[in-house]
Image (spheres, grey):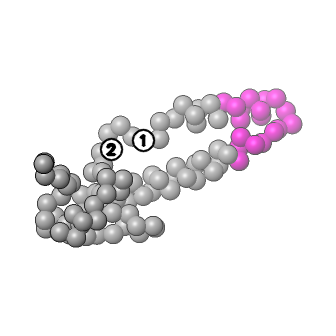
Amino acid sequence: MSAKKYPFQEGDQYFTIEGDSVVQSVWDAQSEELYSISKSYFSTIQEAVYFYKMKQMQIMLTKSIECISNLDCDDEESNRERDRLLSDYYRLDVNPKSFSLIS
């Protein structure tokens, strides 16, 4: 039987996002009991805050795009501009390639 692998060692500081809060913790035996691969763990507060802000911006952008996609303008030029904006959005990769998370 292989030993479980965790993202931190006992005594390491780490951060998680709980609802609308960034929570600072120290890795210990209880952390190992509560560990979940579906939860995001961060080694710095900057990473956690950045991740939280990106998720919130993604939610706001998605809601905005939903509103825009329901617009029907009176003139064709505005409709083309709306379609171009939607096309650009759907090609957008919202997950930066250089950002690494501990998950």
Q: Residue at x 33, y 63 (%)?
A: 16
Q: Which numbered disc covers residue 99?
A: 2
Residue for badge 1: 95
Residue 68 seen anywhere in this rendered image of the structure: yes
Magenta stretch contains residue 59: no
Q: Is residue 28 left or right of residue 85?
A: left
Identified by mark 1, the residue type is Asn
Please give the count of numbered marks on the rendered protein: 2
Q: Circles 1 and 2: CB distance less than 8 Å? A: yes
Q: Residue at x 64, y 35 (%)?
A: 86
Give coordinates of residue 10: x percent, y percent: 13, 65
Q: Quadrant of residue 22?
A: bottom left
Q: Secondary structure at mark 1?
A: loop
In this view, the residue in front, 67 or 35, is: 35
Q: Is residue 10 left or right of residue 58?
A: left
Q: Residue at x 77, y 42 (%)?
A: 71
Give coordinates of residue 13: x percent, y percent: 20, 65
